[in-house]
Image (cartoon, grey):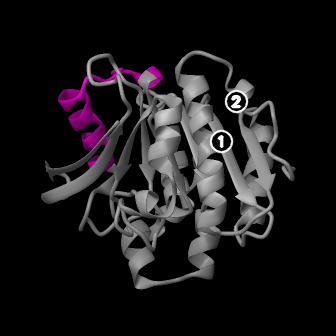
Amino acid sequence: MALLHINYWSAPLGKQAALYFILPQGKETEPCRVVYLLHGRSDDYTIWLRRTSLERYAEATGLAVALLDGARSFYTDSFDGVFKYEQHILETVNYLDKTFHTVRSARGRGIGGLSMGGYGAVKLGFKHPDLFGSITAHSSVLDLAGYIKKHPSPELKAIFGPRSKAGEDPFRLAARVKQIPALYFDCGLDDPLLEDNRRFASRLKELGLPHTYREYPGAHTWEYWDRYIQTALNFHRHTLTGHSSRTALSKKVPGAV
């Protein structure tokens, strides 16, 4: 297995960017499927490697994993025009497709994340189903308008402006799309974002959008995410390789709701 630390030029950001790329053994010459993994608001692209056993989990699934940096952007092209992190993520997908031997279609790409990164994964997956074939999200910020109301700040205003009530909110995106990539998301029973995740699952059901939602014992912690990123990677593997994604979830983790 190879762990690559890559520095590259990001035109949308107008500066150098960095990522980690996990390439499982035997995938150097054959096309690989890539999961793009997004971090939370208080961390950066290195955190998944520092707080989980992601390398080992990726090797077990045979998936490549790209750890991308989104700063505190919510993976959004900011309303004030200062940064373009959605475009940065999309350009990075293109960059890795050109640099490595990847499966260059939605059947070869998944996107996932936690907290702010879970929001980013759902939003980008819903907006770009031509790019991503599967979405996973843990403990995610899904009620964007409600989150901004609870945590008002100049930073969030600069990022979203009035768009928290429009095209950047997952609830509103869900109402606009006709179909979505395969979706799995979960939340801990002691997580402060639990009710928002429950409401999002209910809304998807009302809209007839297929999804899998799970609740497990745990909180907004790395102990929780280290455990359930394994479930997420298995979901991506089964979905992207053409197997039923429900096969990966057929055996519920003890305590799952």
Mark 2 is on which residue type?
Ala
The quadrant in which the N terminus is found is: top left
Residue 229 as seen in the image, left or right of residue 14: right
Q: What element does badge 2 sit on?
A: helix
Residue 132 as seen in the image, left or right of residue 205: left
Residue 213 as seen in the image, left or right of residue 110: right
Residue 6 as seen in the image, left or right of residue 70: left
Q: Is residue 60 magenta?
A: no
Q: Which mark is residue 239?
A: none
Q: Position of residue 244 (x, y in %)?
A: 68, 20
| Upstream in sequence: badge 1 or badge 2 | 1
Which residue in the protein does label 2 denote?
248
Q: Nearer the viewer, residue 197 or 257?
A: 257
Residue name at image x 87 percent, y 53 percent: 255
**Res 168 visible:** no
Residue name at image x 70 percent, y 51 percent: 186
**Res 127 visible:** yes
Image: 153 above or below 74: below
Q: Position of residue 249 (x, y in %)?
A: 74, 34
Which residue in the protein does label 1 denote?
231
Q: Nearer the viewer, residue 29 or 69?
A: 29
Residue name at image x 42 percent, y 57 percent: 49
Q: Position of residue 113 (x, y in %)?
A: 51, 52
Residue contact at pointers 1 and 2, CB within 8 angstroms: yes
Q: Please give the range of residues in magenta.
A: 87-107
Mark 1 is on which residue type?
Thr
Q: Position of residue 5 (x, y in %)?
A: 23, 50
How many numbered callouts? 2
Magenta stretch: dominant SS?
helix
